[in-house]
Amino acid sequence: MPRFIDLSPPLSGRLAVWPGDVPFTRRVSSLEGGMTLSSVTTTLHAGSHADAPLHVTPGAPSIDEVPLGTWVGPCQVVEARVGARGRVRLEDLSAEPAAPRILVKTGTFEDRERFTEEFAGLSASLAGALAERGVVLVGIDTPSVDPWNDAALEAHHALSAAGIAWLEGLVLSHVTPGLYELLALPLRIEGGDASPVRAVLVER
């Protein structure tokens, strides 16, 4: 039996979202006969989520237009030696990229119920280096691939231009660096700029 490692924080009203964005709320209705019916309101960028190129590039593919195979397959978890508000470069990674999907463990955003601005992001140079190595997806354990104070969204644009998909908000604190299989399918939201995902690693 394969071992599954969950990388997704629980979606609840306690989950911190980007300041000013729509928090996750769930409304429950109890119906006759004991049936429960719920509805949710949330930003599409809540918790572990996939951004679409459309999020930063007008006219680019929406989340339902990104090929499904992008989100599933061989994956490598690597640690990054970078501090708060820093940018991860290729030389900061604990290992040379050796899979088409790379998840970067920075350890700079541990409490999912309290938003902090002190998290790390990725560099534009890393996007280029990963593209040269055939990487199709990169993920990070912070709310954004860009640090808090980057209004230009340097890494977002570099990844989009390089044709690399990205995941944000992953929980990697309990994951040992190494090779896995990744399952992180977004919802098929027509025209969506993003989607929550249930990101899971399968031990190889």
Image (spheres, rainbow, N blue to C red):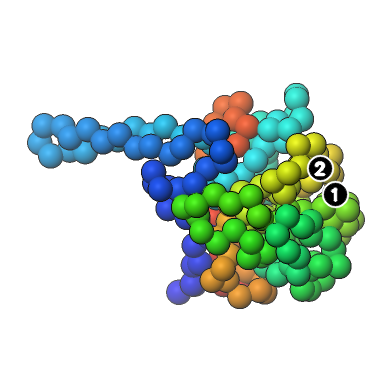
Above or below — where is 187 with respect to 100? above
Question: Disc 1 residue type?
Answer: Ala
- Which badge, 1 or 2, comes first in the chain's sequence? 1
Left or right of residue 24, residue 169 in this image: right
Give the total number of marks visible in the rendering.
2
3 or 177, which lies in front?
Answer: 177
Q: Quadrant of residue 177?
A: bottom right
200 or 151, which lies in front?
Answer: 151
Q: Is residue 73 visible?
A: no
* Residue 174 picture location, percent across and down: 54, 71
- Identify the residue position indicated by label 2 in the image: 154
Q: Quadrant of the C terminus?
A: bottom right
- Which residue lies at the image location 11% right of the left edge and 32% below the top edge? 32
Instruction: Kindly check if marks 1 and 2 are in contact, taking CB atoms under 8 A apart as contact.
Output: yes
Residue found at the very far left of the displayed protein? 33
56 or 75, which lies in front?
Answer: 56
Q: Secondary structure at mark 2?
A: helix
Question: Disc 2 residue type?
Answer: Glu
Above or below — where is 34 with respect to 124? above
Question: Which mark identifies residue 109?
Answer: none
- Which residue lies at the image location 66% right of the left edge and 55% below the top edge? 119
Left or right of residue 158, residue 25 in this image: left
Q: Quadrant of the N terminus?
A: bottom left
- Which residue lies at the image location 12% right of the left edge and 39% below the top edge? 34
Q: Secondary structure at mark 1?
A: helix
* Residue 56 picture location, percent across and down: 73, 33
Question: Which mark identifies residue 124?
Answer: 1
176 or 121, which lies in front?
Answer: 121
- Which residue lies at the image location 76% right of the left edge and 30% below the top edge? 57
* Residue 183 picture location, percent across and down: 57, 56
